[in-house]
Image (cartoon, grey):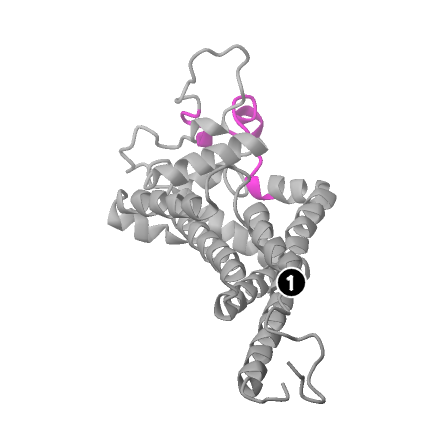
Amino acid sequence: MARRPGAPAGYGEEFTFVSPLVKYLLFFFNMLFWGLPHSLCPQVISMVMVGVGVYARLMKHAEAALACLAVDPAILLIVVGVLMFLLTFCGCIGSLRENICLLQTFSLCLTIVFLLQLAAGVLGFVFSDKARGKVSEIINNAIVHYRDDLDLQNLIDFGQKKFSCCGGISYRDWSQNMYFNCSEDNPSRERCSVPYSCCLPTPNQAVINTMCGQGMQALEYLEASKVIYTNGCIDKLVNWIHSNLFLLGGVALGLAIPQLVGILLSQILVNQIKDQIKLQFYNQQHRADPWY
């Protein structure tokens, strides 16, 4: 069939602007970076995370859950699960179905996550004193609600063991908790004590002594240091960050590069799909033209 003069040569019905390489590269990119390298579908994994988080949240006492909302691990699990599902769904389905709306949503979400990470890093570096104060506030709030939330309790115990620390600034910060408070009218059996995770490890200990922190807040620093960690977790955390700056920088770069690659691939595919739509519209307009 004759082609209309000036019509794009080689742009027949079988031609497509959409590159299969970009399309399937974006799909496998989502499976590799935003899912998990398991045989299970990443959307299924993210929904399981959300389900576990919701179940853990509902199983807690309402008063305790609302009191420590800012430091609740269940909320973090729900947020991460929802975000993972949104990213993987939009990226995988959008690339396979060549859906511009899903691809743009995927690109927008990745851009927001990248900018939030960048802003958090810059603000944390520039306003390091305020960031330290915010971390101190979060830790103190967690200490207050230590016995109210089992997930939070396990998280604090893990952190104190990991960093060999006790409390926020010092071991006496545990007096902020109503169960560990040193006031005379405190009827708790844990009065003036600290959690067992503050205790120095005992070699060859078969059974953990959960009462090893009994009465430690009433002791002076040197005397208490023979039994428990007396340094606060804030200084330990800051020192750990300073000594692992290259590691943290590598982790940040490892997170940033896949995000930028995902944004780039999605935008390339969106532009190719738009060009393909323009081509199809052009073909429909000139299909009845005998010179086409």
In the rendered image, which quarter contains the C terminus?
A: bottom right
Query: In the image, 101: left or right of 10?
Result: left
Task: Look at the numbered disc 1 and give the secondary structure of its residue.
Answer: loop
Query: In the image, 6: left or right of 131?
Result: right
Residue 244, percent across and down?
A: 70, 41
Residue at 67% in and 58% down: 125
At label 1, counting other C-alpha atoms closer than 10 Å, the crowd grade (few under 14, some 14-19, many 20 or more) is few
Residue at mark 1 = 19
**Looking at the image, which is closer to me, 164 or 95?**
95
Q: Residue 19 occupies which quadrant of the picture?
A: bottom right
Q: Is residue 128 positioned above or below 101 on the image?
A: above
Res 29 visible: yes
Q: Is residue 97 positioned above or below 248 on the image?
A: below
Residue at 74% in and 44% down: 246
Q: Residue 229 occupies which quadrant of the picture?
A: top right
Residue 56, percent across and down?
A: 32, 42
Res 141 visible: no
Q: Is residue 255 positioned above or below 153 on the image?
A: below
Residue at 58% in and 83% down: 282
Magenta span includes 217: yes
Magenta span includes 230: yes
The magenta span reads 213-234
Q: Residue furthest front?
A: 1
Residue 197, percent across and down?
A: 47, 28
In the rendered image, which quarter contains the N terminus?
A: bottom right
**Looking at the image, which is closer to me, 271 or 108?**
271
